[in-house]
Amino acid sequence: APDVDVAAVKADLGELQSIADANGGNRAHGEPGYQKSLDFIKGKLDEAGFTTSVQEFTSGGKKGYNLIADWKGGADDKVVMAGSHLDSVEASPGINDNGSGSAAILEVALAVAKADLQPSKHLRFAWWGDEEDGMVGSTHYVDSLAADDTSKIDSYLNFDMLGSPNPGYFVYDDDPELEKVFKDWYAAKNITTEKETEGDGRSDHAPFKDAGVRVGGLFTGAEATMSQEQADQWGGKAGEAFDPCYHSACDKASNIDDKALDLNTDAIANAIWTLSS
Ligand code: PHE
Ligand code: ZN
Ligand code: ZN
Ligand code: ZN
């Protein structure tokens, strides 16, 4: 897999920040900043040759939207999916939560196009609406699948909060094979990972897991506090939150650890190349 340029991911985050700034400070479900965020991501995917579709749903009396992008080819009864929620809470521009995952999978998707990857499994990327009110968009997507379409999803990888400013390196411990792909990549870089426990069931992998799809993912921590032991192994700040700006107005473009974002983006590229080959 290629090394994805973190500068491109950061540029996307700058664009999402500008969208929030111009639209009341957020990119929340039902607000104009959400639609603008979706248009931005969709434009890049369309230009790169993805087949995109927008799935509409209603939540809290407002219309919400999932963005789905399919890459040509690959066995359509073996679909490898990667997803991130694109909405923020209303109090926040949502750059770490979850511009980070959204921009990371966008740049991995663009790398797939640039490489003209011809995977043996089919690749699909998703940007979910209204995660923040209880994974509404991703649940709608899973509920809209016919039973045999669900069984055609080989794996679902979730990316929510990848650049926390006091980062931990957490790998979802759901499916062992998916977990191993991420753990081995980090181990080869001599970076310790831990099992993700802070958010079990708290992001868009939950509806897939409930439907019997194997899931995996990465996470750098939210409002939980980093322990001394974790600070020693990761060079972070013990006694401080992984993300002190979680769900706050200060979750802006400066609220990102570039190294964590870079490593996680490259780890995603490796997983997509490996799992779809
Ligand atoms: N889904 C949570 C949110 O968006 C954050 C989270 C992500 C928690 C991943 C745990 C694991 O607020
Ligand atoms: Zn990189
Ligand atoms: Zn959140
Ligand atoms: Zn989130």
Image (tube, rainbow, N blue to C red):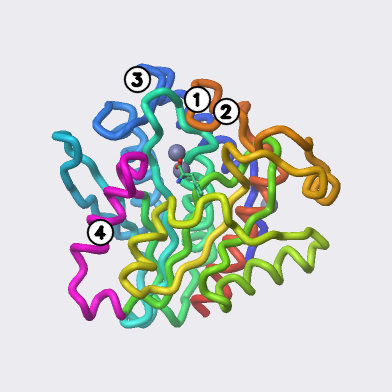
Q: Nearer the viewer, mark 1 or mark 4?
A: 1
Mark 2–mark 3 contact, CB under 8 Å? no
Please identify the quadrant where the N terminus is shown: bottom right
- Mark 2 → mark 3, Cα distance in angstroms: 20 Å
Mark 1 touches mark 4? (CB < 8 Å): no
Q: Secondary structure at mark 1?
A: loop
Q: Which residues are magenta?
A: 128-151
Q: CA distance from mark 3 to mark 1?
A: 16 Å
Callout 1 amino acid: Ser
Q: Residue at x 27, y 56 (%)?
A: 139
Q: Nearer the viewer, residue 175 or 157?
A: 175
Q: Which element type, helix, strand or loop, lies under badge 2?
A: loop
Q: Is residue 62 above or below residue 119?
A: above
Numbered disc in front, either 4 or 2:
2
State which tag comes first along the sequence, 2 or 3: 3
Query: Is residue 53 one of those drawn in magenta?
Result: no
Q: Residue 149 in magenta?
A: yes
**Secondary structure under the numbered disc 3 in the rendered image:** loop
Residue drawn where x is 31% and y is 38% of the image: 39
For label 1, the crowd category at 10 Å Cα-Cα, with few meaning under 14, some 14 to 19 and many 20 or more, is: some
- Mark 3 — residue? 23
Q: Nearer the viewer, mark 4 or mark 3?
A: 4
Residue at the disc numbered 2: 245
Task: Ligand 3: give its quadrant.
Answer: top left
Question: Which residue was labeled with disc 1?
Answer: 248
Residue pointed to by mark 4: 141
Q: Counting residues from the N terminus, which is met first, the one under dot 1 or under dot 4?
A: 4
Picture coordinates of residue 144, whole percent (x, y): 18, 63
Q: Nearer the viewer, residue 266 or 114?
A: 266
> Whole-percent x and y of residue 10?
59, 37
Q: CA distance from mark 4 to mark 2?
A: 29 Å
